[in-house]
Amino acid sequence: MFYHDRELQYKVRVDKPNPVFARMLQQAIGGIEGEIRVCLQYLFQGWGSRGPQKYRNMLLETGTEEIAHIEMLATAVALNLEGAPMSVQDEFAKDKMVGAVLGGIDPRHVLSSGLAAMAVDANGVPFNGSWVVGSGNLAADMHANVMAEATGRVLATRLWEATDDPGMKDMLAFLIARDTMHQNQWLAVLEEIGGLAGAHPIPNSFPQSEENQNFNYSFVSTYIGNDTTEGGRWTSGPSIDGKGEFRVEKAQPLGGIPQLAPPEPRGHAQTEQMTATDAMLGTVADKVKGTLSGSGKGG
Amino acid sequence: MFYHDRELQYKVRVDKPNPVFARMLQQAIGGIEGEIRVCLQYLFQGWGSRGPQKYRNMLLETGTEEIAHIEMLATAVALNLEGAPMSVQDEFAKDKMVGAVLGGIDPRHVLSSGLAAMAVDANGVPFNGSWVVGSGNLAADMHANVMAEATGRVLATRLWEATDDPGMKDMLAFLIARDTMHQNQWLAVLEEIGGLAGAHPIPNSFPQSEENQNFNYSFVSTYIGNDTTEGGRWTSGPSIDGKGEFRVEKAQPLGGIPQLAPPEPRGHAQTEQMTATDAMLGTVADKVKGTLSGSGKGG
Amino acid sequence: MFYHDRELQYKVRVDKPNPVFARMLQQAIGGIEGEIRVCLQYLFQGWGSRGPQKYRNMLLETGTEEIAHIEMLATAVALNLEGAPMSVQDEFAKDKMVGAVLGGIDPRHVLSSGLAAMAVDANGVPFNGSWVVGSGNLAADMHANVMAEATGRVLATRLWEATDDPGMKDMLAFLIARDTMHQNQWLAVLEEIGGLAGAHPIPNSFPQSEENQNFNYSFVSTYIGNDTTEGGRWTSGPSIDGKGEFRVEKAQPLGGIPQLAPPEPRGHAQTEQMTATDAMLGTVADKVKGTLSGSGKGG
Amino acid sequence: MFYHDRELQYKVRVDKPNPVFARMLQQAIGGIEGEIRVCLQYLFQGWGSRGPQKYRNMLLETGTEEIAHIEMLATAVALNLEGAPMSVQDEFAKDKMVGAVLGGIDPRHVLSSGLAAMAVDANGVPFNGSWVVGSGNLAADMHANVMAEATGRVLATRLWEATDDPGMKDMLAFLIARDTMHQNQWLAVLEEIGGLAGAHPIPNSFPQSEENQNFNYSFVSTYIGNDTTEGGRWTSGPSIDGKGEFRVEKAQPLGGIPQLAPPEPRGHAQTEQMTATDAMLGTVADKVKGTLSGSGKGG
Amino acid sequence: MFYHDRELQYKVRVDKPNPVFARMLQQAIGGIEGEIRVCLQYLFQGWGSRGPQKYRNMLLETGTEEIAHIEMLATAVALNLEGAPMSVQDEFAKDKMVGAVLGGIDPRHVLSSGLAAMAVDANGVPFNGSWVVGSGNLAADMHANVMAEATGRVLATRLWEATDDPGMKDMLAFLIARDTMHQNQWLAVLEEIGGLAGAHPIPNSFPQSEENQNFNYSFVSTYIGNDTTEGGRWTSGPSIDGKGEFRVEKAQPLGGIPQLAPPEPRGHAQTEQMTATDAMLGTVADKVKGTLSGSGKGG
Amino acid sequence: MFYHDRELQYKVRVDKPNPVFARMLQQAIGGIEGEIRVCLQYLFQGWGSRGPQKYRNMLLETGTEEIAHIEMLATAVALNLEGAPMSVQDEFAKDKMVGAVLGGIDPRHVLSSGLAAMAVDANGVPFNGSWVVGSGNLAADMHANVMAEATGRVLATRLWEATDDPGMKDMLAFLIARDTMHQNQWLAVLEEIGGLAGAHPIPNSFPQSEENQNFNYSFVSTYIGNDTTEGGRWTSGPSIDGKGEFRVEKAQPLGGIPQLAPPEPRGHAQTEQMTATDAMLGTVADKVKGTLSGSGKGG
């Protein structure tokens, strides 16, 4: 269960409120790279954790920390919105700067939330629960977590670049540091459960003898050109999981042309789909030639 | 900021795991009446709270409690999923019961989460951030909270009826009790800030003299029948907010027929929209009569 | 503005309530082929109608009719849900039939709506406003409407096949008839504004001289095989709009290889993306060969 | 069933078209606080109404009125869009004002709808059917309706503040008045069915003896500080529903640490989840120490 | 299966990068009128095609072409984003033009994608799989395709008007031409399978004798005025499908007042819904008169 | 640009059609772990690729391969749906098995697609463009890709376990093998651009000196218990990126209590929020004590 303190995890100070930056910060709250996602992701992974207890404990610790990050960012949004323009009409006449700002703010910050943060991204698109990944496979989940912290840190550094407000830069420098730790943290779990070679291919509990042995370490080149694809680490040498040898194969169709049954009568396709053959259709096409186009002539 | 304990707020025991009930419980996690919604709603309201500090504090306290409820329900889902059928094919042959169960489970509990809870509702529809209501108006928000706890308690009582598992019934009896408190809690805030008459019409800071005085306390009857609408508390007597007198009016059009300008040429409507008048169209219609229908004759 | 009557447009009778059929009917309410979509689509098209007034009037008439269809279907859902199983547990033990039904119902009909219709489709996916198409171009909108009524009538005939309840079959026979009329109605508008040849290519107000004349009537064959694509009405002969001649061309790349600028430094791509050349990377790859795979060896 | 008139319920006049205000008005059409939501909510509640017939009738009357409000707002959007900038490029050069406007409009008003309203909110996020609440419990639904009208009236007063267009202010003064009535109307139903104390806890048909008696009237304080939570109407005194006495309790874990079973083998968690114990993992961690980090050294 | 070339289908050149136009182009990528939709729509229709093989082949050819269109537009977005403002703060001070631009760009182009295209529309609303229509009925699907290409071409012509960049105008002139062909192509299929009269009412495999014969060719007028609806092609004369005669009927309720059963006790409606009659409620209302409103008096 | 062949990449054979398995396969098509996601993800990453050209080429090759995987799975869905029950009513009476199947199928496979695949997941939730991750940072994107292939392979192995159809098992063994390669492929890119230590923290182009040095390698323990968190690879020793030393810190609030300004008057919070102080509210609470609860007494 959970407790809270009335103080923030780290100081949130806004020197020059900027409602356009408030909108940008929403991406770090309700966006796919944002803190609601990692918060729920770590908590749900912890709550559904099966196997050694220590990972459950650790996931819940960091999931709990992330709530504090949402809180910091929500506070930053509210502080950046103070003094935001509340009106469309008069401001335009009075002040070109305000007009410019007006274009860049989220109108729902004025209309819906009363100058406070919402559970949406920088475009007002609501947070979506589908982003909360927990597969029940610890290695897959750790990769999901590294990915979330990697895109999250990229986002935070871009926000850092987008502002010259010292308070905001200080807050972001803290969040960027936490993302550094969290990237390392999930990678550390991966190392603890066997490293990349031990963990891959994920899931490592599926017997590799059951997968198709002809296709599990070949780069399939779908490039239609005659020149060869340039080499890379993935075209030759031992595979990263240490269980195969990379090679290159030109894409080839091995599956034949699929044949579906005719339409089920109660599904009410068109009669022509159920009765006509390709050959007949040619004839039909001849017979009706010009009718639709002809119909237009009178138009 | 936030802390957690490794223990649950209240005991979660499943005597007879039932994966169909696990799916039903998802509604109380990721559904619009569920705990993720109230959790984020109270927290966001608290983080954006402007005015007296005590409401902020209280909202954060209860928002924090709700995280523990998500945790309890997520645990209940995982426990109900233990022993769930993992296969479509063989089970059908072996056991009619399993076949029946299979129809009722969320296939993503098997395929996506590895027998654990997800941030989705009972139909697998993801939690949606738009459900997190925080308007910046305390009275409007309290009504949003009462509504959330009212539909939430209705949901919980239906779940209570749907199961005969003693452990699940015990957990739900706890959650139902909490919903009772939370309904009362938000109503208590409403009372503290003036009661229904003091709070309504919400927002009470908008000068009522600016609203149209002819329509603010009349029930507009859109019923086309000649018999009168049956009376109710809302058709006569003093209004609930004590600021007007209910009355009934038959719906009447007062706004005339709207007239929009012709299409902007660069918006590329059809030429006919820009050039034809209604009168001309009649003529056109005569001229083209039968063409499209005629075209079909050859078909 | 709008009025209502307390009676339904057409009789809704359910002889044998079936909660699984109730779920199926939801597709005709809140699904993309359903009645909320056409209702809002015709109303929004009417409200935004620019050009001759008669189309506005007509769109609003039929949009208003569609509200009555939602009403009929919502009533049918409620009637089919009467007697639905409210419990997961005991029923299974008692009655295999109920177990089977339970798998097929929408659990939210029990949990969320209290045995009534919702604004969702047959899988509980909510109605989505993006389905409401109104482009401001009358011909495009008429095609959107024909398409909506075509997929709507296909849906209604499948529902008709799925039930043997005489009341439901009667209601569906009415709705199928209305779809017949509505398909014809939107096609009639297309005929009135010029027929297919007059209307196409939509928008017909864009000067065709501005479109690329080499590609506006050729079927581009992306098929990689050496045999020719079989002919059809679309490979030769006059185009349907009467303004070109169909022909076939093998797909060919005419656009060269795109070149984007290097990453903007403040966007924080990886350093390697900003500094390394393709040639350098080969060298790097050689140097690091085996490192990641090597790391796994210890795992 | 439903009828319509060609005239509006109330006059919609736009003196100075403003496409940025058009975008803001979309919130009142397709947003969660908007008119499509209340319209469908009241209609669906009416169509699913069980119990006394008078509430069904009343819900349908007001639901029908709301269609007229969508119509008014859609008209207002279209009128505000007349003269909107259709081009990105040249305008910038010519007119800084237009540039400012351009930033604030919904580009889909130009690109998708041809200067007309859409079923979306002020950020272009589509209306979502999940917002249509109808629980089958009359008291819960009335709270949902009060909440919708409360947030709706807050929105309308903010729109009123955002414009100085006399026509728009007049239209909004009408809509604000209707929201006043509708708030009172739903509260009047609550009074008629027993008042707050009679209705709460909702649902009042669930025997309170079945809910956990230790937690139904206590404010659970999750605050970790040593100082006591400040008092409020919700911390002592009789509960609002008159059935209990408020008290305060510090949050305490009563549920123990949850224990899930090990992963189901066919769910393919990692092997380590199925075989390792916490103790073993320590050893493994020792053995692999440095491997992942070591791997990087070569990079 | 599929192959690719590294070159584009047609040249993409941006003379003056414009990040606001980049945002607009997103509508043609991830919007409902965009290329991801038609691409997946034609491919899914092809993969599920039942009946004559030639339509499957043709659908896959054009579906494959559409991937190349997404590629062109994604390239155009990236090129238009080069030089986009990366910062909110300093730019405002330095340059009013940049401020204006800043309002109009999608902030996620800066924050999330690193100046590249995303699978979203012009408002950042993600592409939605529900837009991919494939009904299994060839005629319905062809109408869906005509509609997609009609709204798609309207969109493309509006984009063409919105820019004066020669490179962009050239690319759009190519895409507009392809939309011309594709409109004609799907109409050509309709002609081949019987023309409008042969195809309608869709599905033509449902026996029309089963539909309600009184309502299948009548325009139902829901207009409440006494004057008659103005005539149109749809009010008299032969129907477009050649199978009926248009006529006009005033809307009339034929369905009576629906009666639902009382609430199911285990669904926990309010007690009053289960026990009170309409008559009783009047009495109750009398008894409680003033209570809620009275409660406010103390506030 | 793109080409296609009429044959499949690999054979798709269904020995015993099973419509419940068809529904499960939808997860691998339109689910977040599915093939539409990886297809669009790799293509969009390729189209937006900045920096060395070889990664663009490689991403497009594999993105193109993934289209062929969607095709295979769509074919598998259609083949599994042949013979699916089309009716709710009669089947129940005749055959308990069919009843069981009916519960488990996606009703939209019958109602919407005519027994064909759709762009949705196993619960009918539409594919969502927000899942397409492309950050412009190559290392972050590679982690996103590893994660997608890891959860994708976990899904495929669960589907493999869920069926005993030899044809389906063979197809899945092929897809599982491809996921093995793709996991290795994206890891190989990571190795080529520096390995984990070279790449992390992502983005590696942000100067680490700017991040808060006190928090970038400490595990913040939010656990409220007195016992220490058990150690793991992430609590001591060198960090995985080789740039720091792991340590543990108890969570502490460093940010003080946030203070927002009072509500902006034009945002229309309640009057009490703007005028009352915390102290005053206590008094108010005393004065109004009992009013709301009193109101109920009359109910």
Image (spheres, coloured by chain):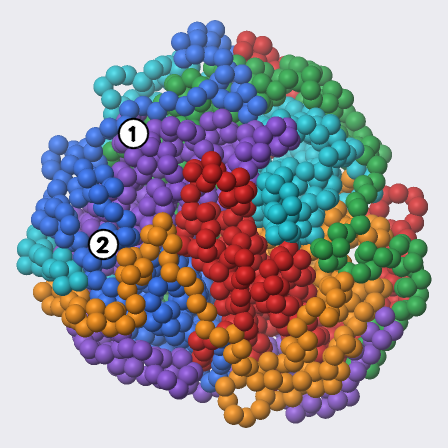
Chain colours: A cyan, B orange, C blue, D red, E purple, F green
Q: Residues within 10 Å of mark 2 (few under 14, many from 20)?
A: many
Numbered mark located on residue C77 in the image: none
Amino acid carrying label 2: it is: His
Q: Is residue B67 left or right of residue C241?
A: right
Q: Name the residue tied to disc 2.
A: C200
Q: Is residue F123 left or right of residue E141?
A: right
Q: Is residue D63 left or right of residue C40?
A: right
Q: Name the residue tied to disc 1.
A: E11
Look at the picture and state if B269 lies above or below A259. below
Mark-to-mark CA distance, 1 and 2: 26 Å
Q: Position of residue D277 (x, y in %)?
A: 66, 30
How many discs mark residues in the rendered view? 2
Q: Is residue E279 visible?
A: yes
Q: Position of residue B210 (x, y in %)?
A: 70, 68
Quadrant for residue A17, please give it. top right
As helix, strand or loop, the secondary structure at mark 1 comes to: loop
Look at the picture and state if E141 lies above or below A199. below
